[in-house]
Image: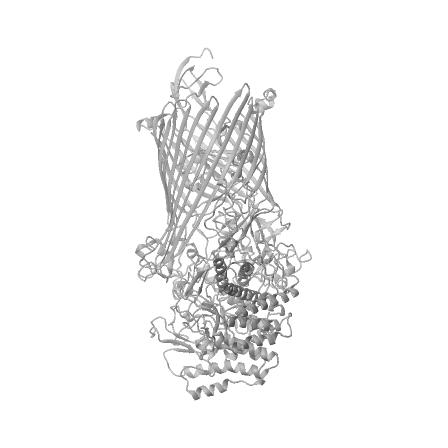
Amino acid sequence: KKLQEHPYTVFTVDYFKSPTGLQSAVNALYSGMRFNYGPEGAVGITCDGTDEWTYADQPRTGAGGTADYLTLGNYTLDASNGAILTPWNRNYSNINLANAVVDFAPGVNMDSTLRNTIVAQARFLRGLYYLLLVEQFGAVPLDLGSGDLHFNSKPYQGFNRLPTADLLVKDYQAMINDFTYATQYLPDQRPANAFVLSKAAAYLMLARTYIFRGYSAAKQSSDFQNAYNAAMEVINNQAKYGTSLLQNFADVNKQGNEYNPEILYSVERIPGDNNDNEVGNPSSIGGGKGVDASNDFTPDYTSVKSPTASSSTAPCATRTQLYGRPIRRFCPTAWLYNVAFADKYNDSRYDGSFRTVWLATQAGGGFNVGDTAFVLAYTNAMADSMNAIPKPYRVIAPREFYIIGGTTTQNIYPSLSKYEDSKKQQANDQGGRPFPVAKLSEMYLLAAEAAFQIGNINQAVTLLNVIRERAAYRPGLSASDLATRVAAMDINASQVTLDFILDERTRELCGESLRWPDLAMRGKLIERVKLYNPDGAAKIQPFHSLRPIPQSQLNATADNNRAQYQNPGY
Amino acid sequence: QSTQQRKVVKGVIVNEKNEPVAGASVSVQGNNIGTTTNEAGAFSLSVPEKCVLVISYVGYQKKYVSINANTTNVSVQLQTANNDLDQVIVVGYGTQRKRDVTGSVSSVNEQALRDVPVANMQQALQGKAAGLEIQTVGTTPGSGAQIRIRGTRSISGSNEPLLVLDGIPYDGNLNDINPDDVASVEILKDASATAIYGSRGANGVLLVTTKRGKAGATRVSYSGYYGIGTVSNKYPVFNAAEYQAMRNISPWNQGYMPLELASIAAGKSTDWQNLMYSNSHKTDQNITVSGGTSNGSTFSLGGGYYNETSLLPGQDFTRYSVRATIDSKIGNKIKIGLNTMNTVGVTNGSQFVNPMFPILALSPLMPAYDSAGNIIKAPNGNNDDNQTQYSPLLLKHNNNNWVDRVRRLRTFNSLYAEIEILKGLKYRANIGLNYTQEEDDQFQASDLPTNPSYFRAQKGNTAYVNNAEAWGYTVENLLIYDKAIKKHRFNFTGLYSIQEYHTHNTSVSKDSITDNFSQFYALGLSNPTPAPVVGGGEQSWALISYMGRLNYNYDNKYMLTLTGRIDGSSRLANGHKWHQYPAVSAGWNLNNEQFFRNSKFFSNNFNSLKLRAGFGQTSNQSINPYSSLGLVSNNNGLAAPGNVIRYNYGPTVVTGYNVSALPNPNLDWEYTKTVNVGVDFSILKNRISGSIEYYHQHTDKILYSVVLPPTSGVSGNYTTNVGSMENKGMEFTVSTVNIQNHHGFSWSTDLNLFFNKNKLLSLSSGIQQDIANQLFVGYSMTAIYDYKKLGIWQKNEAAQAAKYGSVPGQIKLEDHSGPGGKPDGVIDPNNDRYVIGNGDAKLQGGMTNRFAYKNFDLSVVAYARFGGLLVSQIHQPVASYLTVMDGKRNGIKVDYWTPNNPTNWFPEPSTSISPISTAWTTLGYYNASFVQIRSINLGYTVGESLLKKVYAQSIRLYFTVDNVAFLFSPYKNQTGINPIGTNVGNAGVGNPGNLRSGSNGMVTISASTPLPRNFIVGANISF
């Protein structure tokens, strides 16, 4: 009897066959999404090497790799790149946990509505975990060792990826099935101050997945129509689903306004609460669950000299929580601030997405804390005319913005402000704000794209103009001024192309961990990187629209022919 | 001769501790005159006027004393013999004469343990016994070692040998034992010696025997030393000019800091190592009182104090120990005894105090002090680091800025009673009881303008407390029967034992303590947010055993040992809990055979010759409790305190659970079968003695914690039985008396040499390579699987380099193979990585030379390893480690390529050192061979006449230098760094991915507190 083990601190898998166990599993599934939204690896694989973003001057010191963000950005990455491990190493264990919930729930004695909601949440999240993998790697296993979409408890060392073409078809169908189930069994609305999953978020994911499939080798003729139907269900019934567009674009991602009705689903965190955000070492970079995005896009504002480039005063030399840690991992392409946001006047979304004004963070050299320290001008001409007037601060022209290989040594460029977090405990900490995953504005853009693809151009124009007209609004504008701007923002049917829709997605969703899959899944990655991203243009090749299967996965696969599992080209 | 005049010589014979030796034989060389000493060690003998007395006693070297016309009184001190076959050594559950031993046992006696004054037992044992491999895994005070007996057998189970202290299994580590309390250590190596420990014997057994009292007058002994440590070897870093040269061609584009420009202009530089290192010191003080009555009741009481500081501030280790042994006889039939050992160890600076990175990485162009002489708070050569990295000089004064303390109380007690039931039949009960309490305290003060906090630059304070207790007991019932019938001798030992062990810990970490003043003592005095993070754990295991052993000896010629043991362990799955361990071994003393005596060759040359052979099975249950059960946990595997799966729905915080380990209902032990053959010999009048052994171990059902591919959906490891492996090797031990003349000069040598070859024979998955788990069939467990670096692409190879996407100055890798089995002009991870070497030494050993002249003695201890690869993580430039040469910081000095410096060692400092993203690992492999003079010791024993004046029985004074020099080390020649391990497994900032982690990992080198060279003076005195 002494030889029987009676552990006090160990739960077994049977725990998931109880109501509390099922809820704990779902909590873990929500929590696992933190890996995919905010951490540096997730930001890197969705932003770096696109038309929007390229690597900045410190791509080399990624945790665990020498140059992960350099090689992602200039398309010299190999299978040992560390950033691609973020979804690969994190998502399957959550998929398997979702499988456990789906497998075990029918046998758990509990209220059936509650059970259906739990299963719907698990299936939504399983679908999203899969989507995040398929976007990057193409076909990925549905069979983890115990059959397709079933909980695996075997020490399985195989890798069920072949043949990839057949598997991709099954992957898409599995995701569509999961999101469809979620649109049926999730609650209509989310709570006002929490992002518990609801139907609207499921419809968005369903629409996105149908559109992606519509461009893929697994496409079906009804995909765009289905995407349109899913998106319009929410657009047409906003009250039912508890969502609406905000009046002011800049408010959507504003700190303190995270639970606004435009956002359907965010991966949640509590600002400044590192322990509950699962951030043990908030000043480390990457590898965890914190929002590295709040620092990754930050230029080196601390070294900018003012009032002139030759002055010895750096009025922002002290870092602040709001401005963040200037990690300078990613910087915008010139196309982003010069072309996509060419109209920074009528379109409020440039100012609503980027920080262009910094206030002094330390006294000295004629500056007091809080004085304007330097400003990034919309255009070179604007900078020149403003600099003609003597002033105590400096105006920096776009031609002075840092670009790779350029001669400017100051690391300044428009800084993505969507993840700024003034409630961090220290300036160097990772951010802790909820990270938006699904917004009503994207629903309009997906609906417009689906309408365009099924030939309903006028409907596409209507939907796009809803978003564009909203972007004209700025607080304090007179009614007539606003009307003029709205008119300037309106487009007509002749302007609608897939490229225009992609441009519009940039303006609306820039930096929201969507861009790389947006381009890759629509077959636009190679073309647009070659056009708009000089750092990636030289080496990008068609095979780069899929990432390599991580070498560590192949190393752990019990098969002497490991190369057959790799995506072509790597 | 008969005409020679005779006279009476009186004398006293004492042993190495100046205790009288009773029953020693005293004879006249070349004559048949002789006598033996009495209880007081005294003798009186009528001898010729001039002659040589030969004094001999079992277990001691023979001593020759010249008698001349004036000699009437002699005083002789005997030295223990390492090689005497009549020496009694400790074996499992008993003792045996060395002559009768049939298994493979190495013995390290007290004198060998005393050669070097040491902090702990592992240092005392290193290089002292064949087959015992001890590699240091840290250079900070109180750090441990990796101990292997005859190599590695288990991948995931423990490979640490079982430690048995005075007969009771000891669950602490060697660091908990005061070396001064130890009388001898026996190392049981083959299955016939260890099978008696069954499921715990697979990794060999270290039997530690502590000192006990001896009959006679009460004695007081003191031993102590004091030493000063200096830096034996600074890390080579770029000096100011070299740093500038590197930085100017590096990718760094932010220029120099104003203070750096000032230093350049003034030609100043800063040597951060010189500023930070200061001499360490260590001291050891022990007092023992012992004695006993003539009926055999004895006692020994002792206390000790040990303290060691480091070359760096904030690191030290202190041990207090109290010990008592009592052996008492009740009548003639009953013996009872008690041994209690109690130690308190306090280690400071082992948890987070490690400032080596900034010491080596700070710019030599930055001044350390401002013009007023104050420490510059943030002296980094770049703005980024100044936000997070303060000057390590701040560590020189604590100012209530941090606490990093581990306090470990350990009490280990064993009680025995022995009853002689009949003549030859004894019953013995052993009860062991031990308890350990450990508290780990951490505190890091908040950063204040008036008192900068090195560990919390620009942050608030944080504290952590972990309390762990462990207790266990062992109950053993032994029946021992001795019987001799004419020339047959039997000894039977039977055992039934139960062992249980429990451990439990609770930890709390808390930020935002109200005031730095309260440190970690009152975590409640803090802001409610952030909430405290609480952790805890529990483990229990039990082991039930039955054992029987029969020793048979015929006429001292033939010996046979039969052992059987049955073990039941709680750790394994139901249905797999019980297993039996048989072992058999035999020995043959040829020197007792008639033909041996008749043979001129044998009898003239050999004093003894013994053949031994044994076979047996042992196993390894050293897997964690509950491994067979599977695990669902709320741990996310991330850094504490954020390591609990949490989520929030708005303001509502919840906890999540996920599968972290799969259940394994078939988990079984791993089994090792060992064949051992050996020869023990003693030749040339016992002046050369030694042994040669060969062994072969076959381990089946290796316990293995498999890393599954992520697509299995289980992120944790899976412990299971896979595959088989072998270890085979030879051991050679010899002790020689090179010179021993009647002028009193002697020179003797102990040498041991051994090698072990490890090979993985098969994996049950049937595959040849499991790369993720570092398993390669046909190769060693320490195989390194990687690209092979050929050098650096040179200017005249530009065209060839371009084919591989490289340019001159980048790392040149071998194009080993391709999809067609031939080099294909592409470097890819599936075809060009292979097993490029392993970490095993091809040959290793130790040598101790002892010289004695009159009252002086001198010993030199050397240790050597030959062959194998060394993994120098300090030379693997990943992330921001020390050879990354990105210009942002200084680092370890290496010879890097430039167009004008065509080296093949390091690539050119540039953003890309290779198009292969993992090529940086290849810069870390070096030849691991070295020969080290570990210590030189000079001793002086005070003579009889002076002793009497101070009423002392013996006084020995000594002077020692340790870590003397590396006579040979290709790694040190190239890099300037000592080839001594600092860690096990990955300890760089990036994981190369091809090093096994955990306690079975390879020993690696990273930046660590430098090894001190200690100069020690000490004394051993007894009254």
* Frontmost residue, A334 versus B46: A334
Q: Against B349, is A182 above or below?
A: below
State which quarter of the image contains the C terminus of chain B. top left
Q: Residue furthest top?
A: B3
**Between A143 and B902, the one nearer to me in the picture:** A143
Q: From the viewer's perspective, is residue A437 above or below residue B746?
A: below
**From the viewer's perspective, is A166 left or right of A503?**
right
Residue B217 visible in the snapshot: yes
Residue B520 x/y as whole percent: 34, 53
State the residue lying farthest toward the right: B820
Q: Where residue B456 sits: x, y (%)?
A: 37, 59
Q: How many numbered discs?
A: 0
The quarter of the displayed image where residue B208 is located = top left
Is residue B469 found left or right of B485 in the rendered image?
A: left
Q: Is residue A327 left or right of residue B691?
A: left
Residue at left offset 57%, top offset 45%: B702
The colour scheme used to paint the residues is one colour
Side of A523 relative to B211 (left or right)? right
Give the quarter of the image for residue B324.
top left
Q: Nearer the viewer, residue B869 or B414?
A: B414
Query: What x and y, as percent, mark residue B489?
Result: 54, 23
Question: Residue A171: where, in percent of width, then height?
Answer: 61, 65
Specify whether residue B222 is in view: no
